[in-house]
Image (cartoon, rainbow, N blue to C red):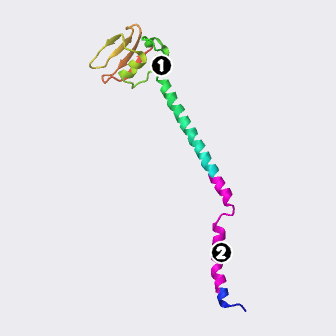
Amino acid sequence: MRDPRYRLFSWLSAPIILTALFSTPLFPQSLEQKVKDLEKRIAQLEQKIVKLESMIVQAQKGQAKPAAVAPDRWKAKANWRLLKKGMNKSDVERILGEPPTVVANVHYGDIWYYPDSKGGNASFDKDGILTSWNEI
């Protein structure tokens, strides 16, 4: 018969040994490699995100550029199509240029004519916000 202390030691040490065996990965190198591969993939995806975000910003900047750089920017239909309701006067002036003719109205707002009342016009409310326009 075996010593009872040996039996007690066996019963107490078995859970410790089993815990040690199953808590450590069987293939630690492959798990480390998987983690490294995932970290590399994350870095690549983050770089793609940065690149795509910069492309979006560039595209948005490109939409607001007037098509014509000449002083008569209002002559280009593409510039008129950049206008959006809610723009302020400085935005419109940046796109179409300085209006040759302005009819001011304190109660209703201003109308800018390019080049005169027979051409295109931009109408603003009394707060200087673009409400409507007619292309040339």
Furthest toward the bottom, the residue is 1
Residue at 58 percent of width and 44 percent of height = 43
Residue 99's spot in the image, x, y percent? Answer: 37, 13
**Location of residue 47 (image quadrant):** top right
Furthest toward the front, the residue is 29
- Segment colored magenta: 8-35
Instruction: Assign a secondary structure to mark 1.
Output: loop
**Location of residue 93 (image quadrant):** top left
Side of 12 where 96 appears, left or right: left
Front one among 67 and 82 = 67
Residue at 30 percent of width and 22 percent of height = 126
Front one among 60 and 111 = 60
Residue 64's spot in the image, x, y percent? Answer: 46, 23
Residue at 66 percent of width and 78 percent of height = 14
Whether residue 33 is situated above or below residue 6 in the rendered picture: above
Q: Which amino acid does label 2 sit on?
A: Ile
Which residue is the site of mark 1? 81
Which residue is the site of mark 2? 17
Whether residue 52 is situated above or below residue 13 in the rendered picture: above
Residue at 36 percent of width and 10 percent of height = 100
What is the total number of numbered labels drawn onto the structure image?
2
Instruction: Assign a secondary structure to mark 2.
Output: helix
Front one among 50 and 68 = 50
What is the distance, in whole Å, between disc 2 and disc 1 at their CAs? 76 Å
How packed mark 1 is, by other alpha carbons closer than 10 Å (few <14, some 14-19, many 20 or more), is few
Magenta segment includes 16: yes
Front one among 37 and 136 = 37
Which of discs 2 and 1 lies nearer the camera? The answer is: 2
Whether residue 90 is situated above or below residue 73 in the rendered picture: below
Residue 30's spot in the image, x, y percent? Answer: 68, 56
Q: Which amino acid does label 1 sit on?
A: Arg
Pick the quarter of the image with the C terminus.
top left
